Amino acid sequence: EGIALGAGIMLPRLGWVVALAILFHKLPAAFALTVMLLKAHYSRTKILVLQGIFFLMVPLGAWGVHFWKGELLEQKLGLLIALTTGTFLHIAYSDILPELHTEHKFRYRFLIFFLIGILLMFGVREIGHGG
């Protein structure tokens, strides 16, 4: 997320979209991480340390991209954005889609929200291209 934010800031039309996506993603991701760690019987202290590391990754990634500025970064900006987008898609397909097949009670609700998320990505893309 930090690399995505750092790369997104370099492109003014993309930066705000990436920042919003990270903002809306961080809270449920932190909640899910806490629930998984509690189920695995981690201590509260260890959970707080791991959550701190989880939250620090965004500013550290953005900071790293900021200091990697220059001609090399401009050439690799598309690659960085593709890498971070691919990571998000990998997580969605490997973690979220299998849940659709195991949780029968909410199966269609999960699928609908997943499809809404995909449609929102295309909608944001169209807004970014000027309609």
Image (spheres, grey):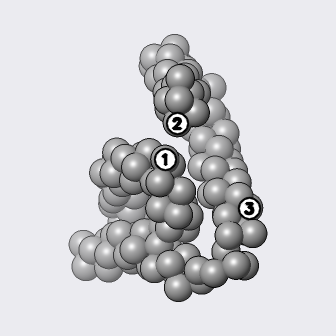
Left or right: 6, with 84 as reference point: left
Q: Is residue 83 above or below residue 20?
A: below
Q: Does residue 115 sit above or below 17 in this rendering?
A: above
Q: Amino acid at mark 1?
A: Arg
Q: Name which quarter of the figure residue 50 lies in.
A: bottom left
Q: Name the secondary structure under disc 3.
A: helix
Q: Position of residue 11 (x, y in %)?
A: 54, 56
Outermost residue on the bottom side: it is: 67
Please tell me which of labels 1 and 2 falls first in the chain: 1
Q: Earlier in the sequence, mark 1 or mark 3?
A: 1
- Could you tell me which residue is drawn at 67 percent across and 64 percent down? 77
Quickly name the residue at label 3.
79
Whether residue 70 is visible here, answered yes or no, is yes
Earlier-in-chain disc, 2 versus 3: 3
Q: Which mark is in front, 1 or 3?
A: 1
Task: Give the residue number, with chain letter if any, for mark 2.
Answer: 128
Judging depth in this view, the residue of 35 and 91 nearest the camera is: 91
In this rendering, the answer to whether 83 lies above or below 127 is below
Query: What residue sits right under mark 1 in the picture?
Result: 13
What kind of residue is marked 3? Answer: Leu
What residue is drawn where x is 58% and y is 33%? 129
Q: Does residue 115 appear to the left or right of 12 in the view shown?
A: right
Q: Around disc 3, counting alpha carbons within 10 Å, would you say few (fewer than 14), some (14 to 19), or many (20 or more)?
A: few
